């Protein structure tokens, strides 16, 4: 018997549909909220800067706009415009923008994985991306020599290679002929993640003085964000979002039943492979600079689905905006709670995400996932 998309996620069908016009307003409201959050986050730090001055400085970066004040009144005195511009544009804004990109990437990938596996508890790290990236980053930190030919250093490069390599191995292990069974894929991902994590744990034991850096990276953080990293992550996330959004309709149909989707002319296996590769690419590109940041890919898509419904045509862009806002707010808390060094943002997201994850488990008690 055919099921609705809502029933495919283990909850009753919504008795009324949210009008597309309301979702457009929601997208515009979230975009406006994102801009406000970016400006507000740029005002916070060891040197608090007034909101109005921050807004003027950011606006002055637009062509033919020059409204920035000559000096800015801060706690304890005045700072010249050049100093304040450096603080905002070169120190705080790269971290804020990278946080938004990573949050958007993880939310998009999480929504994609949840749709592919028809399981709201799926996250972007389900197939071993985090374990592979962690092993790659750990190996990079333990390399006794510098690698000057790597523009961003060895850590992000080997983290990306480890993340992509882990998913490739999972795919090769799980593929049966021309099919890709979801259950086999998940089991292979769990097994490989455990294996790679055990290697990482052994390397941490013998790492010596590098242990603190490894632990800090594995907890996820944005304290070393630079504009050069943003120009790498941005095109990958945007291109990945476009590819995934173009598959929103097939993804909607696959929530009902894969056989029905096949009968409706959808090449299910091709859609699976395309979405897995794309979601893995944006996740790997996002976390190779920051380390694995947990729970964003679980709580954001599911919260959006509860509020705006399961239609992926709207779920994906809404998740992207909510994920960006959520991680910017979480990172702002992370760098403000323990000044001046702050803490890894993964601690904040886990603190917020773990209770929500337990709520999901409690809410789905007794319901089938597949």
Image (cartoon, rainbow, N blue to C red):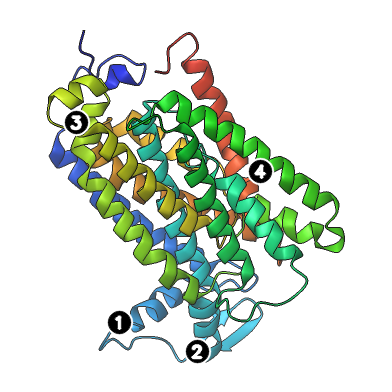
* Residue 212 versus residue 353 in the image, above or below: below
Residue 196, numbered circle? 4
Helix, strand or loop at mark 2:
helix
Quick one: label 4 or label 1, which is nearer the N terminus?
1
Quick one: label 4 or label 3, which is nearer the N terminus?
3
Contact check, label 3 and label 2, Cβ < 8 Å: no
Q: Residue at x 73, y 45 (%)?
A: 199
How many numbered marks appear?
Answer: 4
Estimate the spatial distance between the alpha carbons at disc 1 and disc 2, rounded to whole Å: 16 Å
Residue 153 horizontal/vertical position (percent): 61, 73
Residue 63 horizontal/vertical position (percent): 27, 86
**Comparing marks 3 and 2, which lies closer to the viewer?**
3
Estimate the spatial distance between the alpha carbons at disc 4 and disc 1, rounded to whole Å: 46 Å
**Comparing marks 4 and 3, which lies closer to the viewer?**
4
| Location of mark 2 (residue) | 81
Q: What crowding class fits label 2: few (fewer than 14 Cα within 10 Å), some (14-19), or many (20 or more)? A: some
Helix, strand or loop at mark 1:
loop
Q: Residue at x 47, y 17 (%)?
A: 363
Residue 221 horizontal/vertical position (percent): 61, 58
Estimate the spatial distance between the alpha carbons at disc 4 and disc 3, rounded to whole Å: 43 Å
Contact check, label 1 and label 3, Cβ < 8 Å: no
* Residue 128 versus residue 354 in the image, above or below: below
Contact check, label 2 and label 4, Cβ < 8 Å: no
In front: 236, or 37?
Answer: 236
Q: Is residue 341 left or right of residue 7?
A: right
In front: 167, or 91?
Answer: 167
Helix, strand or loop at mark 3:
loop
Q: Residue at x 48, y 57 (%)?
A: 286
| Location of mark 3 (residue) | 18
Regarding residue 123, the answer to whether it shows in the image is yes
Residue at the extreme front of the image, as rendered: 177
């Amino acid at each position: 018997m055919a099921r609705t998309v809502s029933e495919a996620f283990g909850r009753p069908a919504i008795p009324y549909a949210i009008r597309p016009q309301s979702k457009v307003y929601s997208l515009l409201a979230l975009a406006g909220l994102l801009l406000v959050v970016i400006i507000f986050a740029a005002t916070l730090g060891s040197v608090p800067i007034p909101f109005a001055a921050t807004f003027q400085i950011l606006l002055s970066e637009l062509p033919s706009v020059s409204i920035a004040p000559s000096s800015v009144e801060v706690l304890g005195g005045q700072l010249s415009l050049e100093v304040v511009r450096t603080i905002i544009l070169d120190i705080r804004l790269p971290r804020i923008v990278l946080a938004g990109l990573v949050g958007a990437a993880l939310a998009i990938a999480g929504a994609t994985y949840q749709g592919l596996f028809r399981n709201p508890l799926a996250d972007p790290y389900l197939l071993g991306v985090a374990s592979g990236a962690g092993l790659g980053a750990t190996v990079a930190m333990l390399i006794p020599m510098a690698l000057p030919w790597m523009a961003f250093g060895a850590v992000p490069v080997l983290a990306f290679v480890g993340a992509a390599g882990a998913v490739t191995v999972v795919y090769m292990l799980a593929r049966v002929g021309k099919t890709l069974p979801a259950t086999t894929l998940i089991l292979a991902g769990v097994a490989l993640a455990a294996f790679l994590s055990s290697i990482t744990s052994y390397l941490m034991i013998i790492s010596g003085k590098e242990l603190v850096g490894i632990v800090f990276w594995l907890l996820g953080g944005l304290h070393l964000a630079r504009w050069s990293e943003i120009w790498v992550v941005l095109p990958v996330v945007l291109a990945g979002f476009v590819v995934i959004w173009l598959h929103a309709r097939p993804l909607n149909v696959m929530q009902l039943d894969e056989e029905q989707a096949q009968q409706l002319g959808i090449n299910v296996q091709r859609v699976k492979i395309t979405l897995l590769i794309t979601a893995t690419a944006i996740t790997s590109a996002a976390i190779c600079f920051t380390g694995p940041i947990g729970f964003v890919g679980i709580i954001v898509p599911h919260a959006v689905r509860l509020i705006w419904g399961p239609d992926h045509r709207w779920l994906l862009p809404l998740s992207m905006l909510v994920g960006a806002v959520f991680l910017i707010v979480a990172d702002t808390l992370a760098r403000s709670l323990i000044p001046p060094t702050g803490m890894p943002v993964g601690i904040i997201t886990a603190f917020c995400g773990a209770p929500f994850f337990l709520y999901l488990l409690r809410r789905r008690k007794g319901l089938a996932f597949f």
